[in-house]
Amino acid sequence: MPKPILFTLFFLPFFLAFAAQAQEFPRREVNLDLFVQELFSQQQDKDLPYEDIYENLLQFYQNPINLNRANREELSSLFILSEVQITALFEHINRTGGLLSIYELQTIEGFDLITINKLLPFVTVQEMGLQADRRPIWERIRAEDNNYLLVRYERSLQEKKGYLQPTIKSNGQETSHYKGSPDKLLMRYRVAHTRDFSLGFTLEKDAGEQFIFDDKTHRYGFDFYSGHFQLYDKGRLKTLAVGDYQLSFGQGLVSASAFGVGKGGETITTTRRSDLGIRPYTSTLESAFFRGAAATYALTNTLNLTGFYSRKKVDVSFQLLQDSLDQLNEQISLGDLESSSLQETGFHRTDTEIARKHNVTEQISGANLAYFSKSRRASGGFTVFNSSYSVPLLRSDAAYNRFEFRGRNNLLLSGYYSYNWRNVNFFGEAARSQSGGLGLVQGLMASLTPQVEVALLYRNYARDFHTLYGDGFSENTRPINEKGFYTGLKIRPASRWELTAYYDRYRFPWLRYGVNAPSGGDEYLLRLLYKPSKLATIYGQFRTENKELEEPESLQQIPGLTLATRRNYLLSADFAPTGRLSLRSRLQFSSYNLEHGERTTGYLLAQDVNLEFKRFRIGSRYAVFDTDDSENRQYVTEKDVLYAFSIPSFSGLGTRIYTVLQYSFSRKMDVWLKLAHTHYRYQKTISSGLEEIQGSRRTDVRAQVRYRF
């Protein structure tokens, strides 16, 4: 596509958005892709579980929160309402006896139209009695409308190196290769009703994995199986979970269940974790969940007791230490968590990956005692969390691993609180691991005026604080070996304008992977958003990060530190000129340089066109990208088939084009098809290792069918 035409298409939504200030159209279904995109920062340095966060938000979309029965934690986890707005909502409900209509939100102080329109897809209003269905559970399940079966297929059309015929090496062994086909398969069934029940299962086979039944290697057809059954509000039994589930307590120092978004364009609501307790697990990620049983019981009207037990097999690498011929010890290595995506995603494609599948038993047990005040202004609790493994977990002898977890057992104790005083929400959590290491989070969110909000957060995680399921607010991928102070700001100077910003300064008191000295850094972001109408959004964003890294190619025996500076610029516009057509434009630019080093850059320009008809929907994008190196790789969210979330990265010079088609054959059956093609110029290969593709083009296809019972 000629560049003048592309730039014209890019700026068209900006002009149309300004021209549409006086127009208002009926509210449409939520654009969840755009909603999640606005939460995340432009380029994340740590691997956030995007798919899991997306899916947790989808659960609220599929099962809207009943505002007349909602608690503060549920509403906070949507990242839409401020603490002052939540308090105002509760005060209105207590004063009037409950909402009669969703449109009553407009009468509550502090609820503007922009906030209400963001909130509507995730909430509902029902009288207390309407939730009480006296029919047997199986009859309610059979009659539930939110009842579907989903089947998904995907693969890359080009052949990757891992699928080539293996050769024999000089030692007589085969070269590493994928054992299975390049097809990825997913099957999911779920039936759920808000605050009543949830039942479902998930089956998945990743590309490269064999569909095989082999007890010796723990492979039984699909590579991953997951299932759950949960009941809610049965007298004093608030929640009962059997199968796979998630746990979220306090500020996530013990267990966070992927509800921590971290630093991004939303600078206030995402700093605080939500204490959601037990929730179903429906993701395809093969880690960070619990398998067993859990229950929450109401001891009194303000005191809940939760008990949980989990037992499952986990993937761990075995290494043989040969320090002497007389003494051989087996060592279990979890690997460096900063680069353990292979183990976290659960790939079992090669002999090495298959050998570590489900070879260690993990047991989790514990309890949580939670308090909620009648006024819903205060809450708190205590958590006991014990994990044990069938063999000791050890680390390599690298200096940065000196204080990492070693052994079979880890006992975590934590206490947390949340208190609302006038327009301020105070929150925090303190935890101690079996090693004696402490973790601490203390923060506040305040509405200084109806137009100004601020968030302050201090965290201090000791170098020997060990939490394998925790995800407290941090710069690192885990809450360990870090001190920092975060300041967030949100200003609404006018009804259609919003300015958000944050500044975060952090320090790593001990060594990190790849950095053999204590280090630190700081980061700040500024975003200006303008919403000329309910169907138009424009924002610009600037982000800078300065982080100390180890000097590259240093001649010294102990390398020194150098300062790396990364800058990101983003301009985005989203506009729907009609009920059938929506346009989205995105321009992002980045630069990276080491102190006294050469500056490198990269950019991506993308234009989306989406069309909706009665039974047919089409979403498409054309994008160009150009980066000098991998440090400037460009991340961008993509539209995908239902319940899937894509945020690929692009490096080099090339183009990206995709189309997503959806057709509804009837009220019960929908079909999706996504075709995506990437062309890298001046490249003879794409990717590396077993993922390497000969040539400069990659084409991916994804097909999905959903049948609603």
Image (tube, rainbow, N blue to C red):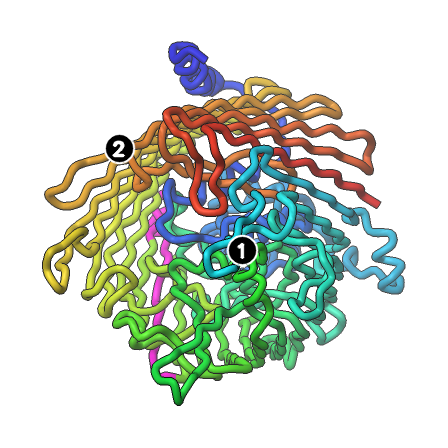
The nearer-to-camera label among 1 and 2 is 1
Tell me the element at label 1: loop
The image quadrant of residue 419 is bottom left
User: What residue is shown at x 27% (from left), y 60% (from top)?
Assistant: 514
- In the drawing, does residue 120 fall left or right of residue 130? left
- Which region of the structure is painted magenta? 435-454
> Disc 2 marks which amino acid?
Thr
**Does any portion of residue 198 appear in the rendered image?**
no
Residue 292 location, x and y as percent?
A: 67, 73
Residue in the image at 49% along x and 22% along y: 622
Q: Is residue 404 visible?
A: yes
Q: Which residue is mark 1?
A: 174
Q: How many marks?
A: 2
**Residue 558 placement: quadrant:** bottom left
Q: Is residue 570 above or below residue 593?
A: above
Please report whichever mark, 1 or 2, sits nearer to the chain's N-terminal start.
1
